[in-house]
Image (spheres, rainbow, N blue to C red):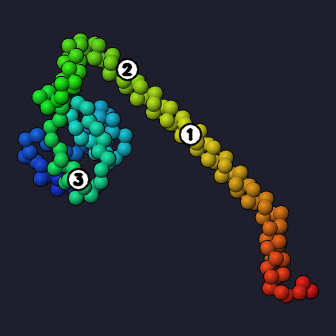
Amino acid sequence: MKPAWDSLMDEYKDHSSILIADVDCTAAGKPLCDAAGVKGYPTLKHGDPASMEDYKGGRDEKALKEFAKSMKPSCSPANIELCDDEKKAEITRLQAMPVVALDALIEEKEKLLEDSEKNFKAAVEKLQASYEKLQKDKEDTANQVKESGLGLIKAVKAMKASGKSEL
């Protein structure tokens, strides 16, 4: 993917409203990556720098170039003229709030995300434990069935089917 990304960065290096860049999240870029919610590598993000979204498309050069061609400035406080009336009203309402109130709102929303992530991880752990128990039960049953003579029963049946006498 890196060669495709490097090609895309080169293609858009002088673009007036689109930035294609890479950040080393293990070094100087770590604070930026933490703020953008990067959890694994490589992670592709797009959108307003203050509210980046995960890229979920293909990772080959063709898919990346197609996505880049579709990028354009979007509705945001920096591009309010691109917003519909409802979004303009929401931005205006938020802009009227004191920074302390915005911080509280951000904290509340981030807490919802954190709680959702915790609930998800707990449910996955339960599913994993259930899966492991079911897997063990299945293996135990298979071993019990084999030990109870399934192989011998199949051998006797095969012999009868072949028409050979037992003695």
Q: Are the residues flagged by discs 3 and 1 in contact, CB closer than 8 Å?
A: no
Residue at the (23%, 30%) spot, across then down:
50
Query: Which is nearer the N-term, disc 3 or disc 1?
Result: 3
Quadrant placement of the C terminus: bottom right
Alpha carbon distance from label 1 to label 2: 26 Å
Residue at the (30%, 31%) spot, across then down:
35
Please state the horizontal and vertical placement of residue 131, each as a whole percent of the image: 61, 47
- Residue wearing tag 2: 108
| Residue 167 numbered mark, or none | none
Q: Residue 31: in sight, yes or no?
A: no
Q: How many marks?
A: 3
Q: Nearer the viewer, residue 159 or 130?
A: 159
Question: Element type at marker 3?
Answer: helix
Amino acid type, callout 1:
Glu
Residue at the (23%, 12%) spot, across then down:
98
- Residue wearing tag 1: 125
Amino acid type, callout 2:
Glu
Please state the horizontal and vertical placement of residue 75, each as a whole percent of the image: 18, 32
Alpha carbon distance from label 3 to label 1: 35 Å
Question: Element type at marker 2?
Answer: helix
| Residue 64 numbered mark, or none | 3
In which image quadrant can residue 33 be found?
top left
Question: What is the crowding at mark 1: few (fewer than 14 residues within 10 Å), some, or many (at least 20)?
Answer: few
Query: Which is nearer the N-term, disc 1 or disc 2?
Result: 2
Is residue 80 shown above or below 23? Answer: above
Please state the horizontal and vertical placement of residue 7, each as a whole percent of the image: 17, 56
In which image quadrant can residue 18 be found?
top left
Please state the horizontal and vertical placement of residue 93, each as a whole percent of the image: 22, 16
Q: Nearer the viewer, residue 26 or 4?
A: 4
Question: What is the crowding at mark 3: few (fewer than 14 residues within 10 Å), some, or many (at least 20)?
Answer: some
Q: Are the residues flagged by discs 3 and 2 in contact, CB closer than 8 Å?
A: no
Q: Nearer the viewer, residue 95 or 10?
A: 95
